[in-house]
Amino acid sequence: MSTTTPIQNNPDSDQQLFERIQKGRVLLERELEKTIVGQKQVIEQLLICLLSGTHCLITGAPGLAKTLLVRSVAQAFHLDFSRIQFTPDLMPADITGTEILSDHEGRRELRFVQGPIFANVILADEINRTPPKTQSALLEAMQEHQVTAAGKRYPLPKPFFVLATQNPIEMEGTYPLPEAQLDRFMFNVLIDYLPFEDELKVVLDTTSQNPQTIEALFDQNDISQFQGLVRRVPIAKEIASYAVKLVGATRPGQPDTKDWINHSITWGAGLRAAQMLVLGAKARALLHGNTHVRFEDIQALVAPVLRHRLLLSYKAEAEGLTVERVIERLLSDSEF
């Protein structure tokens, strides 16, 4: 395998940023512990999305602190925060904004009133509670970081993140997210029930103490610099090739696709999955104190990158196969 060299675009500045990320992670975890108990892996994956400048989908049953987690992270990064509660009657203009007729110096004119999407961190709460037409109102914002209204384009603030929460699709009153929108999310992060001791601590803390305030540790300029550093993290060609081949192995009907993949998957992951896997691995490397990407960084992020991008076949679902099991076998079966 070929060797990689440390980050060296601007050695002095990059070294300082690298050290700040290491110290900042410790301080950030300490701050988040004021409101969030456990969920270390969830918090790490959320930070990877922020450092990568991408969006994150958070899936879990009601009452597992999804909303509290997003709000706490926004406070720690000192970013403008906007919460949009998705409901069945929510309209696209309720998200992006609308034009209204107003009087100005004795004349009537149309004026664009910005919607709640004009913020740094958007909490799209229970995004699968609203129909696909309204869900798709986020597509342009997520991809282009802008909103178009009446033929005019309105840029969104920088940085811009959509952190969406959703309840499991089996629950009553939910709508599946369109595949095109799902693909815009870097990760689908799963929040599960807490272990007994952690749940006991939450119950005791929330019923006997006043809520603690999260202190801001970083500003918008810090985040911009961190994102630039992530892009400069080197990755060996062999490791990048491993990531691309892992993603490619999920696509049925290809010449080299394995029989069990053809049997289990109807639609595999696209190019964006490989891009997100490599970019996320770069951010994870920095969080773990490394100046280059390792195979472990790729393997650790395969599940959150792929779990919302794979469509199981009817045969696989009938056999009780899950996406998680497919991903586990993909990792253990890979010979690249």
Image (tube, rainbow, N blue to C red):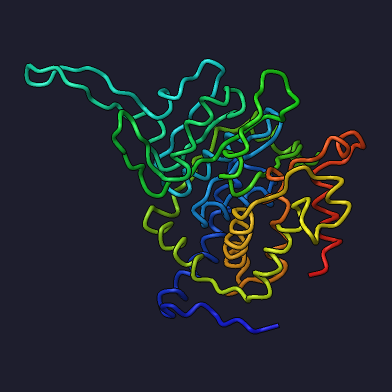
In the picture, measured across the screen, residue 292 lies left or right of residue 115, that is: right
Extreme-right residue of the structure? 319
Q: Position of residue 268 (x, y in %)?
A: 72, 48
Q: Is residue 64 above or below residue 42?
A: above
Using the image as rendered, state which of residue 117 and residue 63 is in the foreground. Answer: 117
User: Which image quarter is the C terminus in?
Assistant: bottom right
In the picture, measured across the screen, residue 284 lies left or right of residue 83, that is: right
Q: Position of residue 103 (x, y in %)?
A: 14, 17
Name which residue lies at 79% across and 59% down: 255
Name which residue lies at 47% across and 76% down: 15
Q: Based on the displayed image, in which of its 4 quarters is residue 199 positioned? A: top right
Using the image as rendered, state which of residue 332 and residue 116 is in the foreground. Answer: 332
Q: Is residue 4 above or below residue 299?
A: below
Q: Based on the displayed image, in which of its 4 quarters is residue 267 positioned? A: top right
Total marks in image? 0
Q: Is residue 76 above or below residue 208?
A: below
Name which residue lies at 66% across and 48% down: 42
Q: Position of residue 260 (x, y in %)?
A: 88, 51
Using the image as rendered, state which of residue 210 and residue 316 is in the foreground. Answer: 316
User: Which image quarter is the N terminus in?
Assistant: bottom right
Q: Based on the displayed image, in which of its 4 quarters is residue 335 positioned? A: bottom right
Q: Is residue 132 above or below residue 334?
A: above
Extreme-left residue of the structure? 106
Using the image as rendered, state which of residue 202 and residue 100 is in the foreground. Answer: 100
Q: Position of residue 187 (x, y in %)?
A: 63, 48
In the picture, measured across the screen, residue 179 lies left or right of residue 303, that is: left
Name which residue lies at 68% across and 65% down: 297
